[in-house]
Amino acid sequence: MVNKKEAVLDNAFGALSSPVRRAMLSRLSQGEATVSELASAHEISLPGISKHVRVLENAGLIRREKRGREYHCRIKPAPMREAVAWLAQHQHFWEQQFDALDNFLAEGGADD
């Protein structure tokens, strides 16, 4: 059974797996934007863009709000903070692994 924290991470990392969604988040890091404004940077249909927006929204990475005839989007930082914290926890392990590999290769371990 997946706990809430793991579900947040799964959704965040899943949403971040798309270059289009990462570009949308980069744009939103500069401030609020409409769905149309987000779409203008991509050669994707509006329904395709809407699908990407829903994935980001379902992952909790953005908030979408209807004002008049347009949807406005803005970043919600909490899930990204969870992802960064998880990566930071695992950074030490991976640094040790890469250091060990560097030492192994420096000692000629790959030549044997």
Image (cartoon, rainbow, N blue to C red):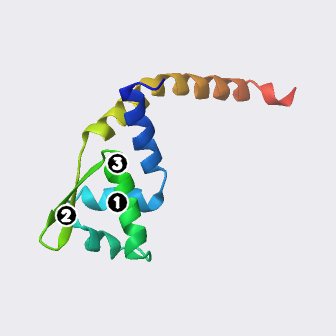
Q: Residue furthest right?
A: 112
Q: Amino acid at mark 2?
A: His
Q: Which mark is residue 72?
A: 2
Element at badge 1?
A: helix
Q: Residue at x 52, y 27 (%)?
A: 95
Determine whether the residue tagged by mark 3 lies in a helix, strand or loop.
helix
- Kindly check if marks 2 and 1 are in contact, taking CB atoms under 8 A apart as contact: no
Crowd band around label 3 with a 10 angstrom C-alpha radius: few (<14), some (14–19), many (20+): some
Residue 9, how many percent across, how many down?
Answer: 41, 35
At a point 42% along the width and 41% down the height, the residue shown is 11
Q: Which SS class for mark 2?
A: strand
Q: CA distance from mark 3 to mark 2?
A: 15 Å
Reading the image, the residue beneath label 3 is 58
Question: Is 102 left, or right, of 79 in this rendering?
Answer: right
Determine the residue positioned at 36% across, 66% down: 50
Q: How many marks?
A: 3
Mark found first going from the N terminus, 3 or 1: 1
Q: Earlier in the sequence, mark 2 or mark 1?
A: 1
